[in-house]
Amino acid sequence: DIQMTQSPSSVSASVGDRVTITCRASQSISRWLAWYQQKPGKAPKLLIYAASNLQSEVPSRFRGSGSGTDFTLTIGSLQPEDSATYYCQQADSFPYTFGQGTKLEIK
Amino acid sequence: EVHLVESGGGLVKPGGSLRLSCADSGFLFSGYSMNWVRQAPGKGLEWVASINGDSSDINYADSVKGRFTISRDNAKSSLYLLMNTLRAEDTAVYYCARDRSLATPGLDYWGQGTLVTVS
C-alpha cells in the first residue's frame, strides 16, 4: 500500500499569511493526488485534484503543485474561514490512502 | 445539484451486521465510481471501498476485506455497504463519496455521513 505522510501535523498562522502544507508518497503516484478541507462536524470538501487542478468554486488562493512523490498545498492570503483540517489522498492505485491530516489554526 | 444522502447507521453489537445506503440525486449515477470513506471519532479519513459504474471493478481496504461488501443499484441510483462481523474498531462516521472521473480522480461530492457505533 502507498503511504502518505503530511507535514506539519498542525500549523498556526494569521489572516493574510501564506501557508504551505506538504504531502509525501512512499512511491511515485505521478500526479494522482487530491487535497481536501474538512471542518468540524462536516464532510470533507475537494479542493484540488490531479495535483494542481482547482475544483470548481474553490477560491483561487488555494494552489496545488508537485508530482511523483512530493506535493504541496499552498494557501495564499489566509482567510478566517480557512481554519480546518487538510488531507491529501493518493488516487494512483487502490487502496486509496489519505495523509494523517494537517490542522490549520488561524491566530 | 448533486446530493448524496446516507442512511442505515446505528448501534450494533460486536459480531453484528449493518447495511448502509447512499442515495443520490442530481447526476447520472451509473456514470461514476462511488466510494465509502470512514472517520473514527477524533481520527483521520480512511478509505473503505470503491465500486465502478457497472460494478465490474470493486476494491476494499485490507481492514474490511472479507467482512464488508460494497454494491450498487443503478436503477435506484443507490450505493450500499453491507458490513458483517463488526468490530469495535469499525466505529466511525461513514461517508459515501463520488469519484469525479476515472481520468482525473478525486472525491468531489460527499454525503453528510452516518454514524456506526459497535459496542
Image (cartoon, coloured by chain):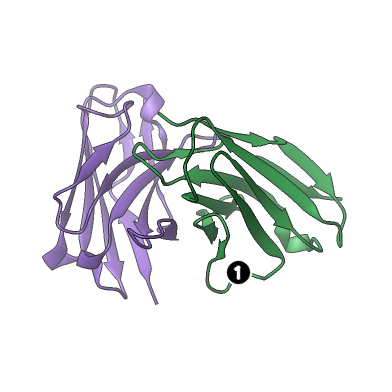
Say if B69 sits above or below B86 in the image: below
Determine the secondary structure under disc 1: loop
In front of the other: B95 or B54 = B54
Q: Quadrant of residue B97?
A: bottom left
In front of the other: B16 or A51 = A51
Letter of the chain in purple:
B
Image point (86%, 60%), residue name? A15
The x and y percentages for residue A74 are 72, 55
Image point (66%, 60%), residue name? A63
Say if A45 sits above or below B42 in the image: below
In front of the other: B77 or A69 = A69
Q: Which residue carries the number 1 mark?
A: A58
Say if A14 sits above or below A101 in the image: below
Image point (32%, 58%), residue name? B102
In the picture, the quarter occupied by the N terminus of chain B is: bottom left
Label 1 chain ID: A
Q: Amino acid at mark 1?
A: Val
In the picture, the quarter occupied by the C terminus of chain B is: top left
Horizontally, residue A42 falls left or right of residue A75, namely left
